[in-house]
Amino acid sequence: MTFELPASLGVRGDRKMAEDIISRIWGKKGVFTCTIANTLTSTIPGVSEAGDTPELTLYTGPADAEYLVMGKVTCMKGIPINPGGIPTPATLTKAALNLSRMPYFIINGGSKIIPNIPCIEVGGEAGDKVNTGHTLRNVLKSFEYGKILGAQLADAHDFVVISESCAGGTTTALAVLLAMGTITENLVSSSSPKNPKQLKWDLVMEGFKNAGISIGDYADDPLKAIECFGDPMMPVNLGIILGAAKKVPVIIGGGTQMAPLMAAAVKLDPSVVGNIMQGTTRWLLSDPNSSMVKIMEHISDRIPMVYINMDYSASPYEGLQAYEWGFIKEGVGCGGSSVAAVISSAGEIDCGKLLDEVHRLYRIVMQLD
């Protein structure tokens, strides 16, 4: 009997591998994690739109985490919205978690602002600006804690979903991918339709100059690349992948921010291939200003990209329609959690049900009822 993907899910890349992984966890019990983190990169004007001002980007991760857990935000006034009133992708993540009733945990990878909820601590600290050439400390500790956590989660669940909320993370992702030599051009995404590609490139090149390295110099040392140019969600999430994928499939929830983790995981332990897949959104894969597909061609042709076919174009709310215009695209594991919701419910949860729940949550957030 062959496994057939439901219409709510699509695949780019190795479809056979995607169907093999999904068939093994179809209708099974998953667990979702979201790692919040900061680097001061997001406070550089023009880098990130994940907040109304560059300074407010430091609140994005903790606010997203509080919203996922409590349905409200206490660490700042209001809710995490992008300029123009576009809601955080955590609205879709929360919809997926609500419907699937999947257990979930918030990990503090290294956040400047500590959210007012329980978090798993891994010894990480908020990072510096990417152009310093040395963004992180405690990388090895966070990485080792991640491996332990990944193994623990895999012992109690049939699959593990990882994700992040870290403003400015596509810039640090670009830096790590270039340092590892995975890519040699800027292929990463942005939360804005106007991807500030040149600014990101210039900041990364300044960081390389300050670190005294060239593109590809850390091809054999992913953790060094992360220490110099990464953000604090990277080492712990990389550890979770390696710790969990030995036992169960791992869905790497997110967009181009997660690409360095897949590249590093394959470098450090090639045996994870066959037990990992990316869980993302249609919006990310159809972004004309980035290319996850091209990035993945440089990482592995055997890591499938599975996406949720969400479509907000018929939504009555302009803030949600903006996703169809190129805003946001991914974040807070909205793609991975949605893919996981479809899988864990054996297809009972579909895009229609997810959209209804997103609308319900959006009305509450925007106080429309």
Image: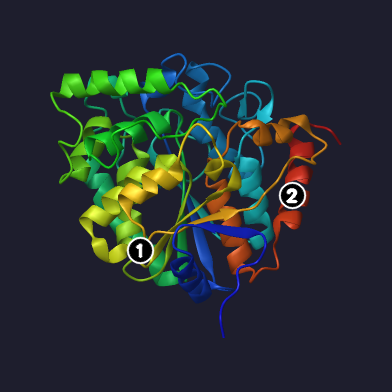
Q: Position of residue 345 (x, y in %)?
A: 64, 69
At mark 1, the secondary structure is helix
Distance between mark 1 and mark 2 Cα atoms? 30 Å
Q: Nearer the viewer, residue 179 or 338?
A: 179
Q: As displayed, is residue 280 above or below residue 301? A: above
Give the residue number, with chain letter if any, for mark 1: 244
Name the mark on residue 355.
2
Look at 69% across and 31% down and name the residue there. Answer: 322
Q: Position of residue 300 (x, y in %)?
A: 33, 55
Q: Position of residue 17 (x, y in %)?
A: 43, 68
- Amino acid type, label 2: Leu
State the SS at label 2: helix
Quadrant (top left/top right/bottom left/bottom right) for the N terminus: bottom right
Question: Left or right: where does residue 68 sit relative to residue 36?
Answer: right
Furthest residue toward right: 369
Mark 1 or mark 2: whose residue is earlier in sequence: 1
- Indicate which disc residue 60 carries: none
The answer to whether residue 113 is above or below residue 181 is: above
* Position of the C terminus by quadrant: top right
Q: How is the image coloured?
A: rainbow
